[in-house]
Image (cartoon, rainbow, N blue to C red):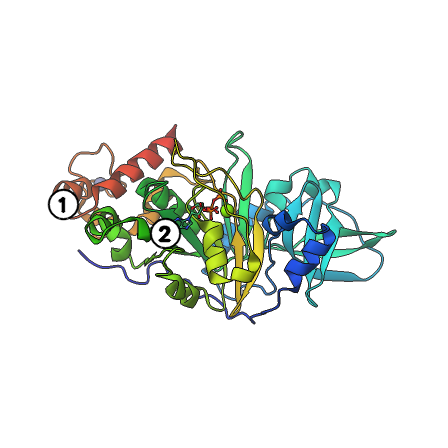
Amino acid sequence: MKKKKKRFRTKGGKRSGQRDQRLLKAARELHGTDKDWADHLEPSLTSQKEDVKARAGAKAEDAGDAEPEPTWVPEGPVFQGTVVSLASAIAWVEDQDHEVVQCALPTAIAQDQRSRVAVGDRVSFAQRDRDWLVAEVLPRTTCLARPDPLNPRLQRVVAANIDIVVQVASVVRPPLRPALVDRYLVAIQYGGAEPILCVNKLDLLSERQRRQELAPLAPYRELGMEVIECSTQDGRGIEQLRDSLRGKTAAFVGHSGVGKSSLVNALAPSIEAATGEVSESRGTGRHTTTRSCLYDLGNGIRLIDTPGIREFGLWNLDAEELREYFPDFEPFAPACRFNNCSHSHEPSCAVRQAVDDGELARARYQTYLRILESLQG
Ligand SMILES: Nc1nc2c(ncn2[C@@H]2O[C@H](COP(=O)(O)OP(=O)(O)OP(=O)(O)O)[C@@H](O)[C@H]2O)c(=O)[nH]1
Ligand SMILES: [Mg+2]
Ligand SMILES: [Zn+2]
């Protein structure tokens, strides 16, 4: 099959790396000595991504800034910074001197907080009376978004202005779920970031099991996606992950319990992000991380650790567009009888034929059909 190397590459801009941990300290000071605060901290982005695919950028803008509402007009000096953490109607913003300032969110933003502002967003802020207040959320270069699970008409932005989204999966406890990988892959490309797949807990498998369990990931490697096999227990893959993240801002996403926070700690032990046991009976995580946190890991790596999710829906995508996010179908699609073939029910579909002939991964095709159905439903 024709390889589509570089399909997922975006031209990530260079970042000036900051090594200081003052952000973490500042946030801890803000919250007294509560060690759990480490979980509530999201290190911020300090620079804008310079260059992303124009289309992806436009998408991110659609997704994030559809209807800018007036907030308030500051009278004094206005500063800019990056949102490093969020709570209800409050944003912690890191300024250019790496000071973290607690800012209230004006009502217009707070009302629609999950869409209007996310960790990683650049904001302007200023003082009103004695308090600091966010004035404006600046346009995003990229984002990762999904529909609100309880109200699919609402968008939830998971992280903003990221170069890379690392999907963290584990091989066992919880088991690998390629269908989730596919959904994330679509959402990541839609938002303009570069996807990396990090498969964790490899220490729990024998070599034979490893080959068997990881076989379903072959299609992603074929697509040119970086797949990193790692373990926070025996350290494998951690340096490869660090190399891939060097100079970049990234978000860790995935199910609860796969080891996202453990990976943060493996990359930078001084962070001490809280981690939680996986439930014995269900083999799933316990949602230990409750808010996204942006950490500065050194080597120019800025990392947003996010809470584990149960399901990942897709935001604002139509059925026709979905095909573009399955580039492995492209070599076959021109041979379909209909040039607008949805590859689901049409006669003489070359994509379906390729699946039957073993030239295309059946699991990828099945995920495609499931997503298609959900978009039409
Ligand atoms: N065997 C093994 N266990 C691991 C590995 N990485 C993490 N764990 C364990 O997996 C459990 C969950 O790890 P966390 O880092 O809290 O997982 P998380 O993805 O951050 O989970 P949430 O915050 O709930 O989304 C903990 O008990 C970790 O010790 C690994 O490489 N191998
Ligand atoms: Mg966690
Ligand atoms: Zn077709």
The circle on residue 62 is: none
Q: Is residue 185 visible to us here?
A: no
Q: Nearer the viewer, residue 182 or 33?
A: 33
The amino acid on which the numbered mark 1 sits, given as a three-letter code, is: Gly
Toward which corner of the image does residue 375 lie, by quadrant?
A: top left
The amino acid on which the numbered mark 2 sits, given as a three-letter code, is: Asn
Badge 1 local density, few (<14 within 10 Å), some, or many (20+)? Answer: few
Q: Which residue is mark 2?
A: 200
Left/right placement of residue 198 relative to residue 68 reads: left
| Circle 2/circle 1 CB separation < 8 Å | no
- Under circle 1, the secondary element is loop
Badge 2 local density, few (<14 within 10 Å), some, or many (20+)? Answer: many
Report the residue at 64% width, 50% height from top.
Answer: 35
Q: Nearer the viewer, residue 189 or 256?
A: 256
In the figure, 184 relative to 264: above or below? above
| Furthest residue in direction right, as rendered | 129
Quadrant into which the N terminus falls: bottom left
| Mark 2 → mark 1, Cα distance in angstroms | 28 Å
Q: Is residue 196 visible to us here?
A: yes
Toward which corner of the image does residue 174 lie, by quadrant?
A: top left
Toward which corner of the image does residue 27 lie, by quadrant?
A: bottom right
At which x and y percent is residue 297? 54, 64
Q: Which residue is mark 1?
A: 358
At which x and y percent is residue 264? 49, 56
Report the residue at 28% width, 41% height from top.
Answer: 340
- Under circle 2, the secondary element is strand
